[in-house]
Image (cartoon, rainbow, N blue to C red):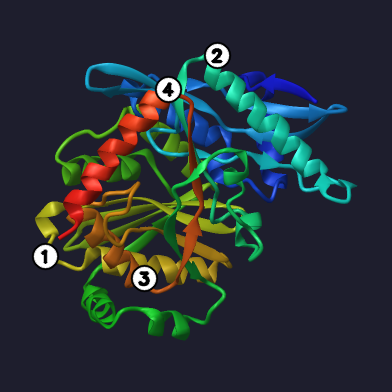
């Protein structure tokens, strides 16, 4: 098998493969790679993505970025993606069976993870962190599992919440938490508007951007990331929802669309109107709109329930999870794995996690 580094010259070939592979979703595309490269300049994100070829055909694409973390004044190299887990490799759908207990898929995975290990050692990477994709077709299959542990990765999975939009609108309404239904009715006073490639304008998008900054109390990421998000809207990879009250736009939510599934990227509500159920109204009307458009599943976001050995949500994060769960749906595993390449770094990391988890025990 041949290993080829991803460059702008083969971006199209990479993205065409993403459309075909059941393992790939938007997180695997070069659009998301470009966003990640710009997202947090302090991480010094570098592109290490590569492709696996056999007989001039792509057998796998491997998202991979090297980032630099600061810990106690020391620079630590990790394979991560914008400070989070890297999307797991995506393989071709037509990998054939070779022998009774081995498939071509197994052989490709062997090649992929051997190369990741090699790059880790060559670049003094101390930890790699990968995640599978709940909205990918292969993950929606009930037979999927965390294959990362086969390659020396520790299971650090979380959960996310999917809403099945194949249900009737009446069923989706009944799935809502009772208090959410009350707040949605109160939100009937808002005018909800949808913006897509057909009607988005720079002025409207800039209103979302300004609200995003106001809600956060600061500029949270570079302008280049917003420019990319605007382009995704123009390319039918996203839609934007706005809530208007008394002739003023007071809330927005940005949603990504890929392969007929949706993920909620970014919400921004004007803090001057925090007493109003803006997000309730936006979410429900977005769910109705997605259903009418024939979307299959909506990933409303991460579900955190309390401290875990590898995850320590604060009260705000727990409140957000609780809020999202109120819109119905069902929890699914967000399969993840991490692998350490440095004994001391592993020991230090786990000592810190043990101490932090111990503090959470009452």
Kindly state the secondary structure of the residue where label 1 is placed. loop
Residue at 29%, 69% (x, y): give it: 281
Estimate the x, y position of residue 340 in percent, counting from the top left: 46, 31
Q: Nearer the viewer, residue 248 or 111?
A: 111
| Circle 3 residue | 284
Estimate the x, y position of residue 73 in percent, counting from the top left: 23, 17
Estimate the x, y position of residue 14 in percent, counting from the top left: 67, 32
Q: Is residue 235 visible?
A: no
| Circle 4 residue | 45
Estimate the x, y position of residue 267 in percent, counting from the top left: 30, 52
| Circle 2 residue | 122
Residue at 32%, 17% (x, y): give it: 75
User: In whole angstroms, how far apart are the C-alphas of marks 3 and 4?
Assistant: 36 Å
| Circle 1 residue | 275
Res 330 label: none
Q: Is residue 231 left or right of residue 317?
A: right
Which residue extends farthest top? 122
The quarter holding residue 12 reads top right
Q: Are marks 2 and 1 in contact (CB under 8 Å)?
A: no
Question: Who comes first in sequence, dot 1 or dot 3?
Answer: 1
- Mark 1, Cα crowd under 10 Å, few <14 / some 14-19 / many 20+, is few
In the picture shown, does residue 294 fall above or below 63?
Answer: below
């Amino acid at each position: 098998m041949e290993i080829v580094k991803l460059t702008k010259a083969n971006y199209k070939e990479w993205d065409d493969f993403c459309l075909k592979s059941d393992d790939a979703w938007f997180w695997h595309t070069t659009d998301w790679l470009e966003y990640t490269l710009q997202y947090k300049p302090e991480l010094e994100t570098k592109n290490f993505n590569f492709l696996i070829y056999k007989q001039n055909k792509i057998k796998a694409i491997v998202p991979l970025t090297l980032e630099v973390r600061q810990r106690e004044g020391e620079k630590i190299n990790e394979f991560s993606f914008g400070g989070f887990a890297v999307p797991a490799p995506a393989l071709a759908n037509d990998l054939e069976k070779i022998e009774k207990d081995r498939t071509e898929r197994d052989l490709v995975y062997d090649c992929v993870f051997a190369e990741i290990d090699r790059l880790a050692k060559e670049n003094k990477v101390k930890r790699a962190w990968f995640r599978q994709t709940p909205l990918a077709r292969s993950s929606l299959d009930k037979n999927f599992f965390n294959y990362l542990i086969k390659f020396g990765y520790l299971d650090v999975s979380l959960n996310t919440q999917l809403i099945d939009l194949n249900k009737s609108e009446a069923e989706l309404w009944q799935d809502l938490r009772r208090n959410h239904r009350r707040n949605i009715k109160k939100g009937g006073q808002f005018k909800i508007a949808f913006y897509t490639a057909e009607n988005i304008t720079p002025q409207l998008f800039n209103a979302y951007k300004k609200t995003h900054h106001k809600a956060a109390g600061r500029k949270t990421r570079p302008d280049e990331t917003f420019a990319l998000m605007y382009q995704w809207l123009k390319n039918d990879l996203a839609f934007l929802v706005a809530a208007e009250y008394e002739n003023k736009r007071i809330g927005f939510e940005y949603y990504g669309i890929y392969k007929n599934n949706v993920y909620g990227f970014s919400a921004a509500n004007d803090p001057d109107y925090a007493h109003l159920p803006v997000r309730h109204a936006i979410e429900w009307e977005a769910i109705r709109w997605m259903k009418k458009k024939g979307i299959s599943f909506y990933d409303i976001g991460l579900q955190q329930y309390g401290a875990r050995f590898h995850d320590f949500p604060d009260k705000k994060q727990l409140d957000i999870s609780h809020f999202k769960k109120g819109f119905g749906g069902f929890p699914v595993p967000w399969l993840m794995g991490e692998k350490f390449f440095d004994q001391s770094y592993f020991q230090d990391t786990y000592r810190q996690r043990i101490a932090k988890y111990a503090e959470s025990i009452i």
